[in-house]
Amino acid sequence: MIRERIKKDIRKTISNFKFQISNGEIEVRRTSDQNFGDFSTNIALKIAKVHPLGVPGSNKAHPGGETGSKQSPMEFAKILADSLQNLPYLKKLEVKEPGFINFFIKDEVWQKQAEDVLNQGPKYGANEIGKSKKARVEFISANPTGPLHFGNARGGPIGDSLASVLEFSGYKVLREYLHDDVGMQVQKLGESIINLTKGCKLEDQEYKGEYIRGLAKKIGKVKNAKEAGEKAVKILLDEILADTKSMGIKYDKVYPESEFGSTGITKKALEALDKKKVLKKQKGAVWFAPSDQFLRDRECVVVKSDGAYTYFANDIAYHKLKFDEGYDLVIDILGANHHGHIPRLQAAISAFGFDVSKFTVILYQWVRFKRGTQVVKMAKRAGTFVTVREVLGEVGKDALRFFILMHDANSHIDFDLDLAKEHSSKNPVYYVQYAHARIASILKKVNGKWKMENGKFNHQLLTTNYELDLIKQITKLPELIEEIATSFAVHRLTGYAVELADSFHRFYENCPVITEGEELKTARLALCMVTKIALANTLSLLGVSAPDKM
């Protein structure tokens, strides 16, 4: 990547001046305005904070006075730019207030990038940030007492796409689901089913959804509410996993919460915490109670007075298992209503002696659907919720995933069902997929009747702004994937996909492909192939199909 070459050269220049700057402090970003170059760095501003009295190890007087006198960020930027300006890939450098250095890259360097992307093919955009490392991502883990509703399902595309990005970044990834099949909720579900079979009205039950009638028929005769509840959540789990499969999600491991109690995993975890002296007995119950003053508000019951484990106790055991298995990265995708659960989990993980920095929780907000002016409420017990199956039936997997992933997890979504079904450029997923299909159509027309040997073509013929802008857009993908592998902001992929499709459509409308002379036709067809690679790889990470026809 060009960005990495720039970082490397900045690092080398800084070391020549004997500055003490860590690698992470060297930021090189794409500019949003081509008038300010292709890349920009603020390193001079950072250096000015660390070394305000001048350039160490240099006998040369610089603007602002003698060596050792106080220098401004602009003066540092000029010193660095002076050392960087002769780099072979640079067209020019500019220094701008208050101390930014802007890099203008030569056209021939960008042109060569197109050829490099073509040769990488399906691997384009991959990196090795997670090489020899393991990550596990838990997502959805829905309440087991009803069909999968959209309030839980939003975490699905987020977790699945994040897992794909981590895999593309070298991690060995485990996709996991926690099946919460114990507790009073299961008992209450069983009671609702039993009461219904005895002739009681559905609206008088704890769980009122019509799905209760279907469960009652499938279960048949049972001894008691406990058995009815246990059978019901097994049936519902199968339905939930079928729905997640329809969303394009396949789990590597499903963990039944009941097994943590029955196999002694939770007991052993609590014994380990007891040895750490972070448990206490109070009013007949056992509490997780960190002694650290800062963590005292994290106190929570782990064993109830009747001897039953709480959900938190089993979740403690679950997360101990995650770290015991040697994972370098542990990620939970949870609904925003779990925000109070996070500090308690962090405190428990810390109490075991694990590195809390390896644990990340991504909270997502709720989804609201637009059906004209009507807002559909989600309430599982009342049975007036929007199921994933309903939405899949209306808009399909691709639109469902794309529309969810268009938004930062921490923002609310108004899901426009009509827009998601529209076959026009107004629909972002259709717009992106159409770009891919359009390229496939172009390549089908030429049917291989164009000259390109061993992935080589005359890339120097790609000289228009439309071609260069498209190449620049394509080459953002590796940078973006690398950033998402550390920031986990998967929603940025959809924005990139739309920008790439937009750039391609502009290129296609302004640069004739098939009708040009043989050599230029080959170069532009190669650029189409390169765009197709970037689009396909992006859509694959999103879990969205890349159709050849639309």
Image (cartoon, grey):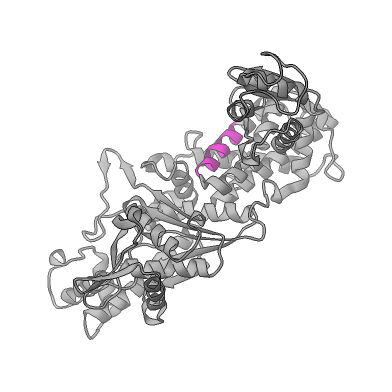
Q: Quadrant of the C terminus?
A: top right
Q: Vertically, is 398 above or below 212? A: above
Q: Quadrant of the N terminus?
A: top right
Q: Position of residue 246 (x, y in %)?
A: 47, 60
Q: Vertically, is 404 above or below 379? A: above
Of residues 435 and 91, which is closer to you in this image?
91
Q: Quadrant of residue 66?
A: top right
Q: Which residues are magenta?
A: 491-502
Q: Is residue 20 left or right of residue 433?
A: right
In the rendered structure, does residue 498 fall within the stretch colored magenta?
Answer: yes
**Is residue 509 at least partly visible in the picture?**
yes
For the point 61% across and 37% down, the residue is 25
Q: Vertically, is 168 above or below 300? A: above
**Is residue 548 at least partly visible in the picture?**
no
Q: Position of residue 367 (x, y in %)?
A: 35, 46
Q: Is residue 108 left or right of residue 49?
A: right
Q: Position of residue 140 (x, y in %)?
A: 41, 59
Q: Which residue reaches farthest bottom? A: 223
Of residues 473 and 32, which is closer to you in this image?
32
Q: Quadrant of residue 232?
A: bottom left
For the point 47% across and 37% down, the residue is 427
